[in-house]
Amino acid sequence: MGPWRADEMTHPSIQVVPERGARAEIIVTEIEGVKLNGPNDLVFGPDGSLYFTDPGTYDPASPEPSYIFALAPDGSGRLVVEFEQPTFPNGLAFDRDGNLVWVESYTGRVKRRLPDGTREDLGRLPGDNPIPDGMTFDAKGRMYVTDIAGGGLHVLDHDGTTVGFHPIEGNPTNCTFDEQTLFVTDAGRLADGPEPSLHGRLWRLDVGIHGQETSVGSIGAAAKT
């Protein structure tokens, strides 16, 4: 984990690997005239579209513009959320009511977008300097948010109220359910230089509840690069 670099660098983009062993193909590098800075997390929504955050490079001292985009099944793209100030939108998911929810690494906050475009602030994570990264939902509609600086996962109710915390001995980055098991990726330590860190780990937590059913989708050939 850490500042990994591919052998072949390319433009910030959404890519697809059509089959095992195949070469990755670029789907899109810009949407509605906006070039992607550096897509981060992605999830299929209830409408079958692929939603993804685009915060660019993590650098609080010199932040890049923040966006959330979507790619429809026919390949067409649209800008879903444009942020007035860079917040580094990171992990995102859809709640049981079909609302888009995301976490912001610069602000430590959790936000929600209703279908009519209204945005709701669900509050800031506990701690002196929370840096939320990934997130997911369980079958009861509770959020599990990794805190890369806080050493664990915050469990939040639907309204953003903190109802629990699962400590992780490291720097948890993302999480996902498989039945009642919550798998958590762990960077091991925060990136502190240009070389990759080999301290990463994968944790499994039995949280006693299934994950929320996820949406599926696909992207057609009409996407514009």
Image (cartoon, rainbow, N blue to C red):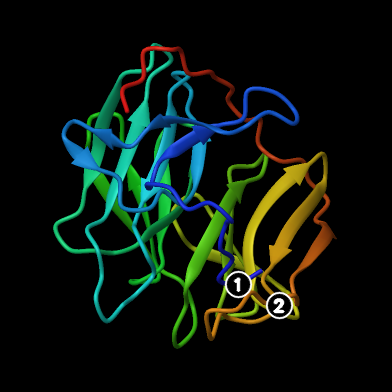
Q: Residue at x 43, y 15 (%)?
A: 73
The image position of residue 200, as x and y in percent, is 74, 71
Per the image, label 2 sits on a secondary structure element best described as loop
Res 96 visible: no
Q: Quadrant of residue 87?
A: bottom left
Figure disc tally? 2
The image position of residue 38, as x and y in percent, is 38, 53
Please rate how many residues cluster around mark 1, counting C-alpha atoms within 10 Å: few if below 14, some from 14 to 19, many from 20: some
Q: Nearer the viewer, residue 222 or 69?
A: 222
Q: Residue at x 20, y 54 (%)?
A: 83
Please rate how many residues cluster around mark 2, counting C-alpha atoms within 10 Å: few if below 14, some from 14 to 19, many from 20: many
Q: Is residue 121 left or right of residue 103?
A: left
The residue that disc 2 covers is 188
Q: Is residue 120 positioned above or below 31 on the image?
A: below
Residue 104, numbered circle: none
The residue that disc 1 covers is 2
| Quarter containing the C terminus | top left
Q: Is residue 15 left or right of residue 32?
A: right
Q: Is residue 200 positioned above or below 13 on the image?
A: below
| Quarter containing the N terminus | bottom right
Per the image, label 1 sits on a secondary structure element best described as loop
Q: Is residue 39 positioned above or below 134 on the image?
A: above
Q: Quadrant of residue 163?
A: bottom right
| Marks 1 & 2, CB-CB < 8 Å contact | yes
Q: Quadrant of residue 72?
A: top left
The image position of residue 63, as x and y in percent, is 25, 70
Between disc 1 and disc 2, whose residue precedes? Answer: 1
Which amino acid, by three-letter code, is at mark 1?
Gly
The image position of residue 201, as x and y in percent, is 79, 68
